[in-house]
Structures are given as C-alpha cells and as structure tokens.
Image (tube, rainbow, N blue to C red):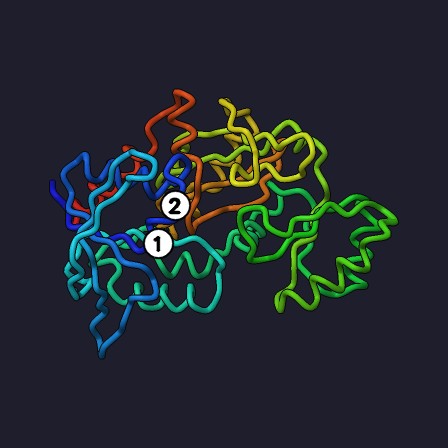
Amino acid sequence: MKLKIAVQMDPIARINIRGDSTFALLLEAQKRGHGISYYTPDKLSLRGEELVAPVQPLTVRDEVGNHFTLGEAKREALNGFDVVLLRQDPPFDLAYITSTHFLERIHPNTLVVNNPASVRNAPEKLFVMNFPQLMPPTLISRDLDEINAFRDQHGAVVMKPLHGHGGAAVFRVMPQDMNFGSLFDMFSVTFKEPWVIQRFLPEVKHGDKRIILVDGEFAGAVNRVPAADDLRSNMVRGGAAKATELSDREREICATLGPALRERGLLFVGIDVIDGNLTEINVTSPTGIRAIQRLNGPDVAAMIWDTIEKKRAAK
C-alpha cells in the first residue's frame, strides 16, 4: 500500500535528526515507498470548507547537515492526502489550537495522527490528571494560599509551566526556600495560565523513563538520566539515554492508559514515569524513538507505520 502523506511540522532545517521522532517517521515512510509532502503550520489556510496549504515534496536522508531536499511548493487541498502527521512541537498556544480545529475538518477521512480534537483536549500536564492514582501528588494552580498549603503538606516541590515543554522553566523549590517568593512573582507575570506544582521525586536522579505507546500498547522505552548538576532529564537539556526494561508498576500504568488513548485516537504517545509515578502524557510530538532504536530496542517508527497502514486499509 502506497500512501500519500503530508507532514505538518516545525521547519525541517532546524531539527536535530539524531533525536527527532518526526524524522524517524519520515525515514520509515520513505523506506516504504510512501509519497511525502511537507508544510509548516503557518501555511495552513481555510477557504470556505477547503483546507489548503502550499506543500513541498520531501526527500530525507539520515545525514547530519544534509538531511532533506524539498521540491517546488504547490497549493493542495489536504483532504486529498491519505494521512497527515500532526508533528509540531509546543508551545501549546492559540496558534496550535487553531491548527487542530483546521485539521479536525478533514479527519478521519484523511487520517490525522494524532486525532486533532484529542490533541487539543489532552495537554500533556492536564490530561494526566485523569489518572491521579498513577501520579505523585500534584496541584495545578496560581493561587498563593493553595500553593503554600500544598508545599506545607509535601515539602520539596517542583514548579513548572502548564504548557511548557523540553524542560524549560522547571524549578525545584525546597521548604522555606528564600527564592520561592521571587519565583512566584516571575511565574505570575510570565504565565497567564495556572502552573504545575508537584511533589519532588528525589529518585529522578536515577532517571525519568520515556515510554512509548502505539495505539495504546507498549512499544519501547528509554531511561533519561539527568546530568549531575541538573534537575531535568530531557535529552535536549543534557539528559543521557540509557537502555531500560519496564517494571510491573510501569506495565500497570501502560495497561491503565491504553484504552483511554485508543478511545481518543491517540496513536503515538510518550509518557514520562519517575520511580513508578506518571508525570506527563505527551500527545503532541513525543521524542524517544530514535534513542530507543540506537540502544538496540524495537523499531518504534516501523510499528507506528504498521498501525497507520492497517487503519488506512480498513477504511
């Protein structure tokens, strides 16, 4: 089966191909003979009922500094594609939300991965709150009294933006921390939304597992170990990728999440787990599949395309 695919993503010239999951998906799609077209989210236009974009034929190569070739742009209606990969990184802002409204108009006749309505309704730090039994104690608030009560109960906490990504603006706040007042003021003026306050898990020094689920089933995992002088384990922040196996608790987490992900059409999902505690469910642009394969893990990109092809064949 040869599919006509469009990928909505951030500028391809800027990506780090060694860690970029979208690039892994594109390599696998090309290997299977699918036709790939590329556009950036700012190029989407809705004219009446027709969703269009100037798309460019895309060829990819696993060569740093020489990883893509783009053809001439041509205006096309996106409902003429078999699959659209919704693969842009956060920030999860109004521009991002608008693009999901646009893409919702062509899904599921054109299969959008992931389901754009579910992407819009499942921000990674909010959707996870549907599963409090799997999480560390967590508060989402910007109310000082509520935050102080939470800190009094749980001691050291982590504060992070509700719609942040890549480990940006993540802080550990200790009991009686003299910096807390300044951090509270900074968060208050920087973010209009409430933010996340979560009990600090000291076991993060041993790693923060990124676990990939494909159509609700476990597909692969990598342990991201933070640098000795950093709280954050994100690989873009210097976290080291290590091979790992799932614990019984982590398998329980996957089994609990699976039906909810399938129900929402969230085909490619990355979850973060620290010491058996679920902290995030990433449905926008999860990383990790290239690191998993480099560590002799499964070929998650192939598993994703197997699933996409199966869903298209069933239409």
Q: Are marks 2 and 1 in contact (CB under 8 Å)?
A: yes
Q: Residue at x 41, y 32 (%)?
A: 218
Alpha carbon of mark 2 to alpha carbon of mark 1: how far?
A: 7 Å
Quadrant in which residue 81 is drawn: bottom left
Q: Position of residue 125 (x, y in %)?
A: 56, 52
Count of residue discs: 2
At label 1, the amino acid type is Pro
Q: Residue at x 37, y 26 (%)?
A: 293
Q: In front here: 234 or 247?
A: 234
Q: Which mark is residue 15?
A: 2
At label 2, the amino acid type is Ile
Q: Element under label 2?
A: loop
Q: Residue at x 22, y 75 (%)?
A: 49
Q: Is residue 271 above or below residue 13?
A: above
Q: Is residue 255 above or below residue 118?
A: above
Q: Element under label 1?
A: loop
Q: Residue 121 vs residue 203: left or right?
A: left
Q: In front here: 61 or 37?
A: 61
Q: Is residue 24 above or below residue 292?
A: below
Residue that numbered label 1 is attached to: 11
